[in-house]
Image: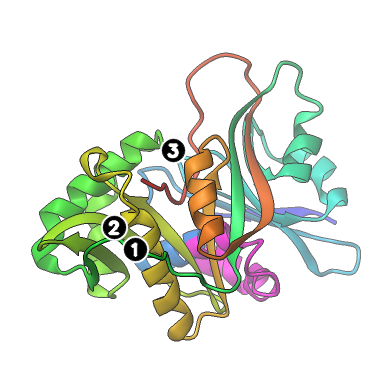
Amino acid sequence: MTWTFTDDVDVFLDAAGAWLATRPAENTLVLTITATLRSSGPHAYGDGAPVLGWWRGPDGEVAGTLIQTPPYRPLLGVVAPEALGPLAAAFPLTAVNADRTTAEALAAGWPGHRVEEEQRLYRLGELIPPSPAPPGRARSATITDRALLVAWHRAFAADIGQPDTHAERMVDERTASGDLTLWETGGVPVSMAGVSPRVAGAVRVTAVYTPPEHRGHGYAAAVTAEVSRAARQAGAREVLLFTDLANPTSNGVYRRIGYEALSDRLLISREAQGRRAKGHRSNRCG
């Protein structure tokens, strides 16, 4: 009944990958982040080495995971309640990104803690395309859009308080794989959305962004509906996305096109004051 830690993503996935895949929706962040580490190297998210951990219960089976990719704070997948005490003893947590119940249980022993972010995980039910649809059409982004896409990814990162150190990599990888989509009207791109690589049958809609001058026309709903439709048509069993609970607009948009609430995640900082914590984020609506 111990936590084991490594900086080797292959060692981690050999130990915990099959277990993570049994609950791909709840473990979506761990699955996609480790997939990126495997494909792009240990410094895909920053200069620091990643920390990847798993916990085995009394039956010897994996029943919890943790990953940290500096500069981001530690992030938990599904974790058995009985693993939390050993985790607090084994790992110096100053903040945590986890499902609501797990995060609150860990933070109960942190006097003066504060909630930095609240996110809601949604799962696509029956897709309901916007009606009437906004003017324009969706198209796959290409390498000729690179400068625009990098600028939009950086603006997206600034909007959600994230570093933009991997904007170029993300754009290059997702245009190459066809996983970035633009909505354009009159030949002018006005909104974008991406999807994560499919892992364990699941994809997650990411980087939904509309520049301020184009907001309020329904472009984000239209491009999100299109990438969701395409992902399901391509064989994804689960189509997921996260929203910021502080943004009622995006939550309403996604519900209207068929997304259903699955669970909440909190980023909780042990320190009552100080700089805003950094946690892996997924998408924004505009």
Closer to viewer: mark 3 or mark 1 = 1
- Residue at the far front in the pictured view: 132
For badge 1, the amino acid type reads: Val
Q: Which residue is mark 1?
A: 223
Q: Main SS of the magenta segment?
A: helix
Q: Which residue is mark 2?
A: 192
Dot 1 falls on a residue whose secondary structure is helix
Please say if the residues under marks 3 and 1 sit with CB atoms less than 8 Å apart. Answer: no
Q: Which residue is mark 3?
A: 71
Residue drawn at 66 percent across, 70 percent down: 15
Cα distance, mark 3 to mark 2? 26 Å
Closer to viewer: mark 2 or mark 1 = 1
Q: Is 30 colored magenta in this rendering?
A: yes
Number of residues whose C-alpha sits closer than 10 Å to that of mark 1, classed few (under 14), some (14–19) or many (20 or more): many
For badge 3, the amino acid type reads: Pro
Which label sits on residue 79?
A: none
Residue 32 vs 165, above or below: the answer is below
Number of residues whose C-alpha sits closer than 10 Å to that of mark 3, classed few (under 14), some (14–19) or many (20 or more): some
Dot 3 falls on a residue whose secondary structure is loop
Dot 2 falls on a residue whose secondary structure is strand
Answer whether residue 99 is visible to the viewer in this image: yes
Residue drawn at 37 percent across, 64 percent down: 132
Closer to viewer: mark 3 or mark 2 = 2
Q: Position of residue 87 (x, y in %)?
A: 76, 43
Residue 197, quarter of the rendered image:
bottom left
